Structures are given as C-alpha cells and as structure tokens.
Image: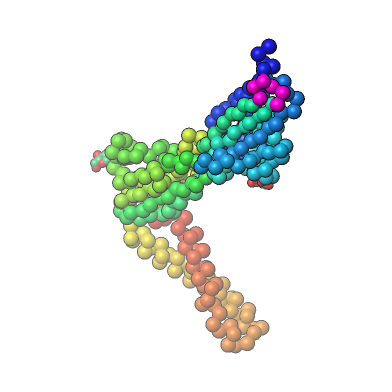
C-alpha cells in the first residue's frame, strides 16, 4: 500500500492572513506508519530560522503558541513581528520516506481602527487638514475619507458632488487637506484604513464651518459676556466665603487665577455649540 511507504504532509492554507488575534497554522499528516513521529516547527524570518516547537516543547513564541493535534500550531495575540515563514517538519523513522516538511507564510494583518483627527470648527475660506493614522496593519494600509457617508474621490474634479471642493487626499499618509473650506464642506467625516486582509474605520466626527472673522469675534465677545454674567459672581461668592475664614492677604489674589481661566474655557466651549454663529 503506497500510504505506508512514507510520511506526507498537507496544509489547508499556505498563506495565512493573520487578521485575527488567534491563528492556526495547519500541518495535517496525510499518511504515516511511524507511531511517534518527531514534529518540529521553525520560524524563518529574513532567512534566519528559529525554533517554535522543538523536543515536544514550545520554544520561541513562549506563552503565545501551542501544538494542536496532529501537528498544527496555534498562535495567539499575533503582532506584526510574527510575520514570517513557518515550516512544519515531521520525521518518521519507521517510514521508507522518513521526512516531509511544509512551508506556510504568515503574512498580512488586518488594520485596527485608525486614529482620526478632524477639526471641530474651521472658518470659511481658510485651509485645514484632517489626519488619519493606523500602524498595525501589514502591509501598510491605504486610506480613504468619507464625508456624510460618501467616499471622497481622490480628485474632486471627477465628481459632480465635490467638484467645487478644494481638497486633496493622500491615500498613503491619510492626510485630507482643504485649501479653502466652503460652507458645503461642513459635515461628518471618517476615514478608513484598508489592506488585503481587511479594513477598519474611525467614528465619524463633525467638522463645523464658521461664517467668518466676525463670527469668531462675536463668539469670543460672547464668552467674555458669559464670563461676567456667570463666572464672576461665582468667584465673588467664593471670595466672600474665604474672606470670613482666612486671612486678608491670602484670598486677595485668589479669584483671578486658575478658576477664572477654567470658567472662561468651559463657557466658550458651551457657547460654541449654541450655533448662533455657526452654519
Ligand atoms: C493576549 O492579549 C490579551 C488582551 O490583549 C491579554 O489579556 C492576554 O494576556 C494576552 N495573552 C497572551 C498569551 O499574551
Ligand atoms: C460648482 O460651482 C459652479 C459655478 O460656481 C456652480 O454652477 C455649481 O452648481 C457648483 N456645483 C456644486 C455641486 O456645488
């Protein structure tokens, strides 16, 4: 019978895309007559081999790998550094053909959710940049941007919807730059990082477009008004409270410090979202 003449290995996947945190490299023994064959796994990275499984023990990838019957290997928490070729070798002393090996390459890694930065508000007519970054995917992913769920074409001139927009996209770096923002550029933006193993995207973030400098002036002016209406009385109340307990000099300097600044910021943020000066 041919099958008793030697060891023959087979795998279900010769190229494994490591897009999950747990992967299994398969090394199936199709035929063998030796009872306790010697099983070894080697990892070959940049031409240099190291042992993953040797003398019935996990060597490299300590705590992250396990042999699974018959000769498969499980690896957890794969990272980019696990990208390599893996070789399963089985030696069967009692077989006529007493050795076989199979090479599997662990290659691609799915991107994780990219980090996106979208300015909250931009003044009409000014320039701005939105950024997107992902650094787990392998090979390095390419980036795409979406505005209110519509993909931004690489060249706005190619689209009826975006023809008047002044943006440029760099799919390699994830940068989306506007030379001059328009009212119509306002909306929700998100970015997607994609490679052969898959894709991931960040949550949409809103970019508002402010009318003009006057709008900004009124906003700041409003913040000052709000400060005097709300923050200042609060400070005064505190001051009086302290005044009764503590010494004269100590609390005299107090209200203008950190608290004053905090109230100013908080109120400005609050005021911004009232949208009176935002379109
Ligand atoms: C794998 O990662 C998870 C969470 O990221 C961690 O809790 C776990 O301990 C890791 N396992 C190993 C074997 O490193
Ligand atoms: C683009 O600008 C042209 C000329 O100002 C205008 O006629 C057209 O409607 C604009 N298109 C869009 C989609 O806004």
Q: Which residues are magenta?
A: 93-98
Question: Which residue occupies 47% across, 37% down?
Answer: 195
Question: Could you say which is closer to the camera, residue 204 or residue 143?
Answer: 143
Q: Is residue 247 left or right of residue 17?
A: right
**Residue 133, image x and y in percent?**
46, 48
Left or right, 158 with respect to 19, comes to: left
Q: Is residue 82 magenta?
A: no
Q: Can the viewer see residue 112?
A: no
Q: Main secondary structure of the magenta part?
A: loop
Taking the spot 74% from the left edge, 28% from the top edge, the residue there is 36
Looking at the rendered image, the quarter that the N terminus falls into is: top right
Residue 5, image x and y in percent? Answer: 67, 17
Q: Which percent across, then down, holds residue 223?
A: 45, 65
On the rendered structure, is 207 left or right of 31? left
Q: How is the image coloured?
A: rainbow
Where 269 falls versus 189 (above or below)? below
Viewer-side residue, 244 vs 110: 110
Q: Is residue 97 magenta?
A: yes
Relative to 262, 187 lies left or right: left
């Amino acid at each position: 019978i041919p099958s008793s003449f030697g060891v023959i290995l087979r795998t279900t996947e010769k190229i494994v895309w490591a897009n999950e945190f747990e992967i299994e490299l398969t090394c199936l023994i199709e035929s063998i007559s030796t009872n306790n064959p010697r099983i070894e796994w080697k990892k070959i990275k940049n031409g240099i081999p190291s042992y993953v499984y040797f003398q019935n023990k996990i060597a490299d990838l300590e705590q992250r790998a396990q042999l699974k019957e018959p000769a498969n290997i499980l690896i957890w928490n794969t990272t980019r550094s696990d990208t390599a070729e893996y070789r399963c070798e089985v030696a069967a002393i009692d077989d006529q053909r007493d050795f076989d090996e199979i090479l599997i390459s662990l290659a691609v890694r799915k991107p994780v959710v990219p980090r996106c930065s979208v300015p909250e508000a931009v003044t009409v007519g000014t320039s701005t940049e939105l950024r997107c970054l992902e650094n787990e995917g392998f090979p390095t992913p390419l980036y795409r941007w979406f505005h209110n769920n519509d993909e931004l074409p690489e060249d706005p001139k190619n689209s009826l919807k975006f023809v008047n927009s002044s943006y440029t996209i760099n799919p390699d770096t994830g940068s989306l730059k506007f030379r001059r923002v328009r009212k119509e550029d306002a909306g929700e933006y998100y970015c997607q990082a994609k490679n052969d193993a898959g894709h991931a995207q960040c949550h949409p973030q809103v970019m508002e477009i402010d009318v003009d400098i006057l709008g900004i002036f009124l906003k700041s002016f409003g913040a000052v008004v709000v400060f005097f209406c709300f923050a200042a009385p609060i400070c005064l109340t505190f001051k009086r409270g302290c005044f009764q307990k503590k010494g004269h000099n100590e609390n005299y300097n107090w209200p203008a410090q950190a608290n004053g600044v905090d109230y100013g910021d908080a109120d400005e943020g609050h005021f911004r979202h009232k949208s009176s000066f935002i379109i």
